Amino acid sequence: MTDIARALLPSLAGGLLIGLSAAMLLLLNGRIAGISGLVAGLGRDRGERRLTDLAFVLGLLSGPPLFAVATGAWPVMRIEASWPLLAVAGLLVGFGSRLGSGCTSGHGVAGLARLSPRSLVAVATFLASGMATVTLMRLVA
């Protein structure tokens, strides 16, 4: 196996799993796999739907431990930002998710797959905002 294939396989597998889980949630439960909506649903008592939200979120959180069991090592992550910057970024992402009526997973994965015009606009806005933020951060830093 080439070095390029070895580097790309984990990302390809992750992308396939995300797509499969989003498709299964839509086909089996009629729900969009928007993580911000699923997490927000945990705070409300909605009966069986709350259990579905909890199961999906627990499945997401179990990824790194399962990776560690399968490979013998935890996934390598490199975060170069400070905790205050990460906190502000998280709040802005949360605000944007509420403002845009969904997050990157709901619009980017499920919405684009359904050819939703609203999701196309939302994803274009996410990407443009991200590019502007990175450009601004590199100019300031």
Image (tube, rainbow, N blue to C red):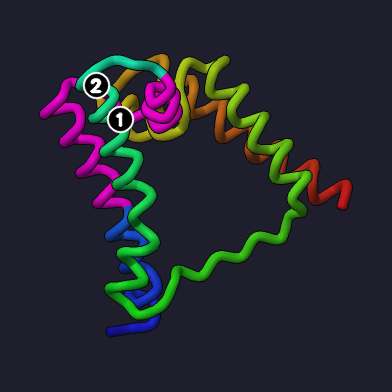
Which residue type carries mark 2?
Arg
Magenta: predominant secondary structure element? helix
Coordinates of residue 62 in the picture (x, y in percent): 34, 54
Would residue 25 appear left or right of 131 to someone viewing this image? left
- Residue 64 lies, with reference to residue 60, above or below; the image says below
Q: Residues within 10 Å of mark 2 (few under 14, many from 20)?
A: some
What residue do we see at 24% from left, 21% from top? 49
Coordinates of residue 134 in the picture (x, y in percent): 71, 45
Magenta stretch contains residue 33: yes
Q: From the viewer's side, name the closer residue of 69 and 11.
A: 69
What residue do we see at 36% from left, 64% from top? 65
| Magenta-tinted stretch | 15-43
Q: From the viewer's side, name the closer residue of 127 and 80.
A: 80
Distance Cα–Cα, label 1 vs label 2: 6 Å
Q: Residues within 10 Å of mark 1 (few under 14, many from 20)?
A: many
Q: Determine which of the numbered discs, if any, sits on residue 53 in the image.
A: 1
Q: Is residue 120 visible?
A: no
